[in-house]
Image (spheres, grey):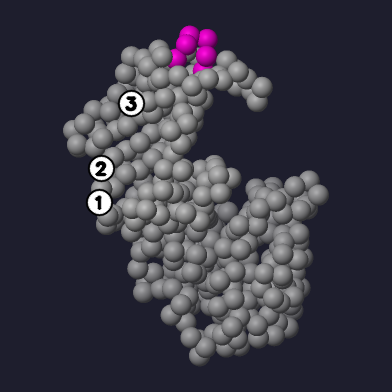
Amino acid sequence: MATKRSVGTLGEADLKGKKVFVRADLNVPLDDAQKITDDTRIRASVPTIKFLLEKGAKVVLASHLGRPKGVTPKYSLKPLVPRLSELLGVDVVMANDCIGEEVEKLAAALPEGGVLLLENVRFYKEEEKNDPDFAKKLASVADLYVNDAFGTAHRAHASTEGVTKFLKPAVAGFLMQKELDYLVGAVANPKKPFAAIVGGSKVSTKIGVIESLLAKVDILILGGGMIYTFYKAQGYAVGKSLVEEDKLELATSLIEKAKAKGVSLLLPTDIVVADKFAPDAESKIVPATAIPDDWMGLDVGPDAIAKKLAELTTSKGVTTIIGGGDSVAAVEKAGLADKMSHISTGGGASLELLEGKPLPGVLALDDA
């Protein structure tokens, strides 16, 4: 998957005057007044679009937003137009649909260096079904294809996989390329020692990742709500903490597997406990082996991970990759995002890649 053709290989001869269908991930959070609360994803899509515009291409931009069931005004991409126009330095034209006559007319009228933003592709159920007729309609207004939406690369949808059957070349955008370089690189030939920190509330959703990583890492550090299942499996009292009772044997077998493979499996030594799960709860820090009966463990203690990672990256030349929505948000909130080697925009796609699963949106692109 790492060796896909990149948009960077396309020159002016390939792009000038051509209509390029760009699938970006513009799935940004909006508040009740339809204002963007975090424009990270829009900013991340800019380098690929600007590159195409500078080479004289006409860009037809597609994305999803949220999980609409049919046409849902609150999931419209219209609120993105002002910010997108500002970042690109062009007046982005917005279509009221993503296929059909109006889209065809607007695409035909695009000047070189112009951008047409299509309406949310998920307003059609055919998008997620990867319906070939729908994919053909999407593709009909363009000459070639760039996928820069790593966050949806694990889904075979019409705009991520289906359109590649009708548009050639089909290449990876710069953001997609960077994600693949870091994540495929990390898993395929990591610098040693290789450590992974896996969090999350449940062991069950992370089994695949943990098992896949056990074959590759030297050190595996666990955090989040899932650690209490591991503590209980080792015979510690966990009070009222979240435990997946049906996963205790699995936790024990993962501990055994790590031992057999010579992987250091580390659980936090201190944790934050609270008397209830609420903002006004009373909380304290206790050793992991001493959770009081009526208290619940909520998180790893203050031997804070993000600061340590930032320090290792800047002072020791360690490569740090942060993925998963909540982890990324926490690192950004701590003001440490720019201290990490790579912040993954992928969420589910990053997890599937780390589990060793192929990503259909990547496989569909041309080989380098």
In the rendered image, is residue 350 in sight? no
- Main SS class of the magenta portion in the image: loop
Left or right of residue 216, residue 174 in this image:
right
Q: Distance between the residues labelled 3 and 1?
A: 27 Å
Residue placed furthest toward the right: 33
Q: Which residue lies under the disc numbered 2?
A: 218
In the drawing, what numbered circle is on residue 114? none
Residue 127: quarter of image = bottom right
Place of residue 105 in the rendered image (x, y in percent of width and height, measured from the top left): 74, 79
Left or right of residue 146, residue 29 in this image:
right
Q: Which residue lies under the disc numbered 3?
A: 250
Place of residue 52 in the rendered image (x, y in percent of width and height, measured from the top left): 57, 79
Discs 1, 2 touching: Cβ within 8 Å: yes
Q: What type is the residue that disc 3 sits on?
A: Leu
Comes first in the chain, label 2 or label 3: 2
Q: Distance between the residues labelled 1 and 2?
A: 8 Å
Comes first in the chain, label 3 or label 1: 1
Question: Nearest the camera: 12 or 312?
Answer: 312
Within-10-Å neighbours for mark 2: few <14, some 14–19, many 20+: some
Stretch of the chain drawn in magenta: 291-296
